Amino acid sequence: MQSSAAAIAEPVVDRAQVHELQSRIRQMQATTLESRRLETHPALAPLLPGGALKAGAAYAVRGSTTLVMAMLAGPSAAGAWCGVVGMPDFGAEAAGRFGVDLDRLVLVPHPGDQWLTVTAAVVDVLSVVVVSPTSRARDGDIARLSARLRQREATLIVVGDWPQVEATLTVSRSGWDGLGGGTGYLSSRRVTVESAPRGGTGQRRRAELWLPGLDESFRAAAGTTRLEAVS
């Protein structure tokens, strides 16, 4: 017996057109995320690709909790809610002096072994999240967290090494100023910060910052930003 339903011919798929459409969709999605940038303190802008933190992206910071605070200052002052996971020694008072709005700061100092789960949950509700991992994350978990960042258009700042980051900022040199050339009352600290781009290739940025300066805030040391090729 023949079926009364009309047979529907299988459509002919032009793979070239499909690939072109997929490419255009990815470009549009990238453009959308690219247009979502978070305010950044002017002292840090020269160190970041595009001069700002990008929504949906991750960054790594090595060698300085105060540099982490400085990275939070710009978005926080612009109205973003920020979170810090796994940093029990994070000084909220010091962060406030750097310009972080403590009324919009969420601290989760002791996430334990659940740090990745906690971070993913915080990413769902906050714009900028700092995390100090207590253990190595699996590749699959990192990929899922990266997808969630893009979906929520949040920004992740990881203390330490992390794959798939837009840039890694490292304090490579540090020196205190004060009475007796730094042997007395320590009044300010000058640091050299290096920024390596994604994959370690491209333009490496280097800048001198007062972190903190005499007024306990932070600022750039004039005329010290440099760019150099990274092979």
Image (spheres, rainbow, N blue to C red):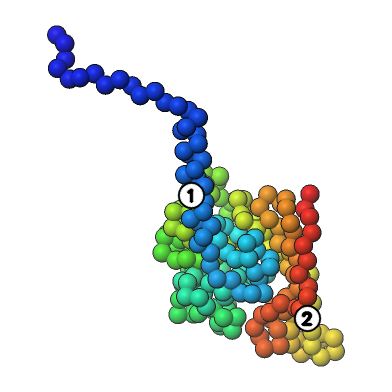
Viewer-proximal residue among 97 and 93 = 97
Extreme right residue here?
180
Q: Position of residue 167 (x, y in %)?
A: 65, 58
Name the residue: 68% across, 56% down: 197
- Whether tag 1 and tag 2 are in contact, CB under 8 A, the answer is no
Residue at mark 1 to residue at mark 2: CA–CA distance: 47 Å
Residue indicated by mark 1:
28
Q: Residues within 10 Å of mark 1 (few under 14, many from 20)?
A: few
Dot 2 falls on a residue whose secondary structure is strand
Q: Quadrant of the N terminus?
A: top left
Extreme top residue here?
1
Q: Position of residue 143 (x, y in %)?
A: 52, 47
Name the residue: 41% across, 64% down: 125
Q: Quadrant of residue 220?
A: bottom right
Dot 1 falls on a residue whose secondary structure is helix
**Horizontal side of residue 178 vs 45, given as left or right:** right
Q: How many marks?
A: 2
Viewer-proximal residue among 22 and 113 = 22
Residue indicated by mark 2:
176
